[in-house]
Image (spheres, rainbow, N blue to C red):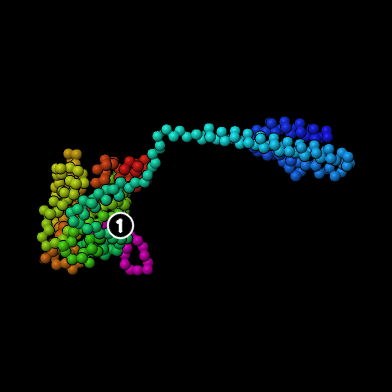
Amino acid sequence: MDDLDKIQEKALKDIEKAADEGALKSLKIEYLGRKGRLTKILRELKNIAAGERVSIGEKANLLRQKLEENFSKKEKLLKARTKKTVLSEEKIDITLPGKKMLVGHLHPLTKIRNEAEEIFTAFGFAIAEGPEMETEHYNFDALNIPADHPARQMQDTFWIKNPKTKEKFLLRTHTSPVQIRYMEYHQPPIRIIAPGRVFRYEATDATHETQFYQLEGLMVDKKTNLANLKAIIKIFLREFFGGKNIEIRFRPSYFPFVKPGVEVDMKFNGKWMEIAGAGMVHPKVLEGVKLDSRVYQGFAFGVGLDRIAMMKYKIPDVRFFYANDIRFLKQF
């Protein structure tokens, strides 16, 4: 009987002091578990004289019931306290304005390309594409670029070793091969643009990269001329830069695949800036794709998308486009 009184006194005090649910669970095991203090007394009843067994057993069972009730009350109290604490710490003020979610968006060069494509398709130009890894034939030979031309040397071209074939492969240095591939399977009138990534083996700086994007255009028909070329380029630049009065000029230049060749300059912020290379398609290029140069003539031009993107967005360094700095990219 004395042991039961001591267990009751001690257990009730311990239950009252329990600070959390973990501590309370440990106490319940200590007193009411399979090897608990009260459980041991109940198991020892068989060893007590019959006269005392009934009274001790009755008192032990009443104590067990009382302790279970106290454990239950304390558990509910601790759970309510925990819930209140959690609700207080995780309280959300629904009157506060929501946080703006960051969403994906297009890369600035992709936006520029899409915009340029929209302008040219409105003129009636089709979009043509080709492989970034090209053969020497399409990248040089078919474009009337001589074997001894500097562009074929290592300083300008990424050549790809392929011991399984005699044909030489490279990363294309311009998108002009797309024009050759297109003319092989289409008859005039031809009106296409060929946007895409190109590669040059050269040192990088604020205005040069080993990879960049070009947009080349080709128009072949019986009566195309430099006046048509000038009009097309001028309208494109006017639409692209949103200006009503775009000034451009042609300067004589040399490109193996056009004759005559010209550099196209545009007046930008009061200064003349080179914007494109262009010219009338060389007769040898037309003959190479089995088009009669006495019947057909055409013009071609190439614009650097990175360059006009820098001009439009006032970007000082072309390398920003390829650094993957989210601080730069998220502005677009």
Q: Residue at x 31, y 65 (%)?
A: 168
Q: Is residue 3 above or below residue 130?
A: above
Question: Percent x, y for residue 154?
Answer: 31, 57
Q: Residue at x 29, y 64 (%)?
A: 135
- Magenta stretch: helix, strand or loop mostly: loop
Q: Is residue 163 visible?
A: yes
Q: Is residue 93 left or right of residue 124?
A: right
Q: Nearer the viewer, residue 42 or 56?
A: 56
Q: Nearer the viewer, residue 44 or 197?
A: 44
Q: Residue at x 30, y 49 (%)?
A: 110
Q: Nearer the viewer, residue 178 or 49?
A: 49
Question: Percent x, y for residue 304?
Answer: 25, 50
The secondary structure type at the circle numbered 1 is loop
Question: Percent x, y for residue 81?
Answer: 59, 33
**Residue type for callout 1:** Thr
Q: Residue at x 14, y 54 (%)?
A: 229
Tell me the residue that label 1 is attached to.
Answer: 157
Dividing the picture into quarters, in which one does residue 170 lie?
A: bottom left
Q: Is residue 180 above or below residue 27?
A: below
Mark 1 surroundings: few (<14), some (14-19) or many (≥20) residues within 10 A: some
Write down the region rendered in magenta: 155-176
